[in-house]
Amino acid sequence: MKKLVSREALGIAKSILSHGSACDNCLGRQLAQISTGMTNNERGRIVRKALSEKKTKKKCVICNGFFQNIDKYARMAIKALKEIEFRSFVVGTVMSSDLIKREESLWEDVGIEYCETFKAESNRELGKILERRTRTRVDEKKPEVNVILNLAKNKIELQINPLFVYGEYKKLVRGIPQTKWEKYKETVEDIIAKPFMRESRGSGHAMHAAGREDIDARCLDWRPFVFEVLNPKRRGLKLEKIRKEINRSRKVEVENLKFSDKKEVVMVKSLQPDKTYSVTVSFENPVQKKDLEKIKKILGKIEQKTPKRVLHRRADKTRIRRVKDISWKRINNKKLEIEIKGEAGLYIKELITGDDGRTKPSLAEVLKNPAKVETLDVVRIHLNE
Ligand SMILES: [Zn+2]
């Protein structure tokens, strides 16, 4: 406390006041580093008293009356936040060019040795009022809402941070893509989104999954995903209710829903599990029983050029993936049911057909018999191997 009324501090305070009428906050803020453990307002009051200066009702020339009117901004923020369910927030300030000029010219005069910035104080002080009146808390790291005090536009803007929910899904029917795709009207994402959007009143959504199955393939094992709701107005979702509703679609089933975060999106996207597929394959010519053992020749390394069917949207590259296991069941002399365990990224359809020599070896090649995929399902996602 002694230092606060030192000659140096009082000298600074005097020069501030030479700019015109200044509020306690602005006085105290320039001396913030001198004496801690109190607010700028308290600090300013002490200095003012030491200078025998009277408190003035005039508009502060430093903050242009902001701190004298902070309650008005708090009310604006509370009004903007009224429709939104949140537990944590952080305040950010956009200063007007006029305020920036005022702060800079003050610093030129009194120096910046002991000061705190206008923004640091406006963020903190508005934050304290909002914490108290909305019974929420400031969270710098993971706020649910960013309250932007825009003093250039004299308004409060809100950025509602997305809501993330982790889950795992099965796709029980063929013919729906995982996410928006060309002419398809329904997607796995849409089916999952429906209850989420209604309950959260968000403005949009995104689906982040650990890989995707082909549109015409079912996915009969649980595939991890993170569902992201943009601008949610409600966060306290009843996940069990949402799960049940999705599962009633009979097209997509979900389980293990839990609140998540952005980090998990990265984690889920980086998963590259092996997968086991069940494929029904029909052949042009009858497959002789003695030839069946040749199927094992496709175990091991497979060289795949980008399949023709995806060439229009992917670069033409050669990739090497492994077939780790294979077994088969004869349905008739021209049809087999094959189970293939392959490394992440292995193109299964091309492994069967050979894709005009772009995948080597292929089932058609080792059996010397043109082959076609009738149905394809993901039956296992080997997450923990
Ligand atoms: Zn002020």
Image (tube, helix red, strand yellow):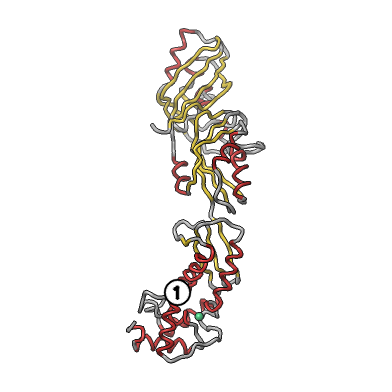
Query: Where does the image place residue 150, in percent across and percent down from the top left?
Result: 57, 69
> Relative to 77, does residue 3 appear above or below in the rendering?
below
Q: Quadrant of residue 84?
A: bottom right
Direction bottom: furthest residue: 52
Name the residue beneath numbered marker 1. Answer: 117
Q: Is residue 114 left or right of residue 349?
A: left
Query: Where does the image place residue 82, in percent across and percent down from the top left?
Result: 60, 61
Query: Where does the image place residue 223, in percent across and percent down from the top left?
Result: 50, 34
Query: Residue at 40% of width from left, 82% of height from top?
Result: 111
Nearest the viewer among 244 and 161 is 244
State yes or no: Cβ of the residue under disc 1 lies below 8 Å from any atom of ligand 1. no
Q: Is residue 181 left or right of residue 108?
A: right
Q: Is residue 295 left or right of residue 82?
A: left
Query: Where does the image place residue 187, in percent across and percent down from the top left?
Result: 61, 37
Crowding at mark 1 (Cα within 10 Å: few <14, some 14-19, many 20+): few
Nearest the viewer among 134 and 332 is 134
Nearest the viewer among 223 and 179 is 223
Q: Secondary structure at mark 1?
A: loop
Query: Residue at 57% of width from left, 48% of height from top?
Result: 229
Nearest the viewer among 299 and 115 is 115
- Residue type at mark 1: give it: Thr
> Relative to 8, does residue 224 appear above or below in the rendering?
above
Quadrant showing the N terminus: bottom left
